[in-house]
Amino acid sequence: MCAKKQGSLENLSIVGVDIGKDVFHLVGFDRSGQVVLRRKIKRLALQETFGMLPRCIVGMEACLSAHVVSRTLRGMGFEPRIIPAIYVKPFNKGQKNDYNDAEAIAEAALRPNLRTVPEKNQDQLDLQALHRVRSRLVSRRTATINQIRAFLIEHGITVRSGLRALNNSFEAILDQRRDEISPRMRGVLTGLRDDWHWLDKRIDQLSDEIKEVSRSEESCARIMSIPGVGPMISTAMVAAIGKGEAFDRGRDFAAWVGLVPQQFSTGGRTILGRITKRGSRYLRMLLVQAARIIMMRPHLWPNFSFGNWLAGAVARMPGNKAAIALANKLARIAWSILRHGTSFDAARDRDMVMEAV
């Protein structure tokens, strides 16, 4: 370990940590802005090293192990701040190296109005892992099914859209088209079909586990009182934002999910564009799916407190725009319920419960 000190560690006010796989780079400033700490440590030496430092603010970029490091340092009495990488980039100076990155993180963490990433507990990280694995398996299943269809089309065989249609006609195609499909291609297609069914089982297992969490978690149960919102959205929200303390109002949460229009203002004139698509793409996709489910059932709209608003929005907006507007409203309602511990104030239809995301 090396240390390039220009002052006393007694006046240390902030430390920037560049987190690596095996080593961390630390740069610390005192109250006058002078560098008083410049050190490289092993990951296993984190607690020992910080145990010798005065308690102060510790900044770090949002990355894989940032939440574990943050919880460890908070337990030692430090004030950790997890910063999105996009907010650190403007403070980078000179060449790209780990010490310069740590210095930029420290400078960014000093900003009083900087938005930080909410610290996640282990239960949130575990739940988030379930969603990520399930999402990856769903993508693999889609790719596998598309590959089966592509190979069949190469042999002049088309199957109508839908998973059920392909699954039901698969064996019949192999039996009736023996002259067109070679034995080798039959083996390839059969193997892909087996992969498809294995992925179905894994996805169902993960879905059941997520549903079990939604039933046992009180916050998830309250969010699921919203029309169109089921185990997937409720658990994804809890995994992403916990109790929602990081946001002052529902509009801030909707902006974080990326469900607000881009704004360009100049000369007193404001132009609104497409949605920003910032934040969690996965959560935004789930909310839009829930909005589309609600829009497919106009006969249920009078049962909801936002039914009149939705009818007016559909009348004056294109379908996709109305779906985004409804997804925004669902996000804001969900944040309010999560933050204040209440439930939605309208009855839900049984069909809506079954189709909830």
Image (tube, rainbow, N blue to C red):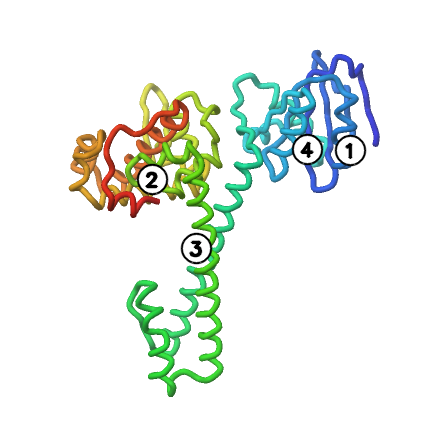
In the rendering, at what x and y percent does residue 90 appear? 58, 28
Counting residues from the start of the chain, the first of labels 4 and 1 encountered is 4
- Inter-mark Cα distance, 4 to 2: 38 Å
State the residue position of label 4: 18
Q: Considering the numbered disc 3 on the image, is that residue within a helix, a strand or a loop?
A: helix
Considering the numbered disc 2 on the image, is that residue within a helix, a strand or a loop? loop
Q: CA distance from mark 2 to mark 3?
A: 19 Å
Which quadrant is the C terminus positioned in?
top left
* Residue at x 45%, y 80% (from the top left corner): 186
Label 1: which residue? 45
Mark 2 Cα within 10 Å, few/some/many (few <14, many 20+)?
many
Residues marked 4 and 1 touching at CB (< 8 Å): no
How much space separates mark 1 and mark 2, taking CA atoms? 44 Å
Of tags 4 and 1, which is closer to the observer? 1
Instruction: Identify the amino acid type marked 1.
Output: Ala
Cα distance between the residues tagged 1 and 3: 41 Å
Q: Nearer the viewer, residue 82 or 108?
A: 82
The spot of residue 255 in percent (x, y) is 40, 30
Q: Which residue is mark 3?
A: 204
Residue 74 percent location from the top left of the image: 64, 24
Which callout, 2 or 3, points to the residue nearer the camera? 3
For marks 4 and 3, the one nearer the N-term is: 4
User: Marks 4 and 1, how far apart in space?
Assistant: 14 Å
Mark 4 and mark 3: Cα distance apart in space:
39 Å
Circle 3: residue type: Asp
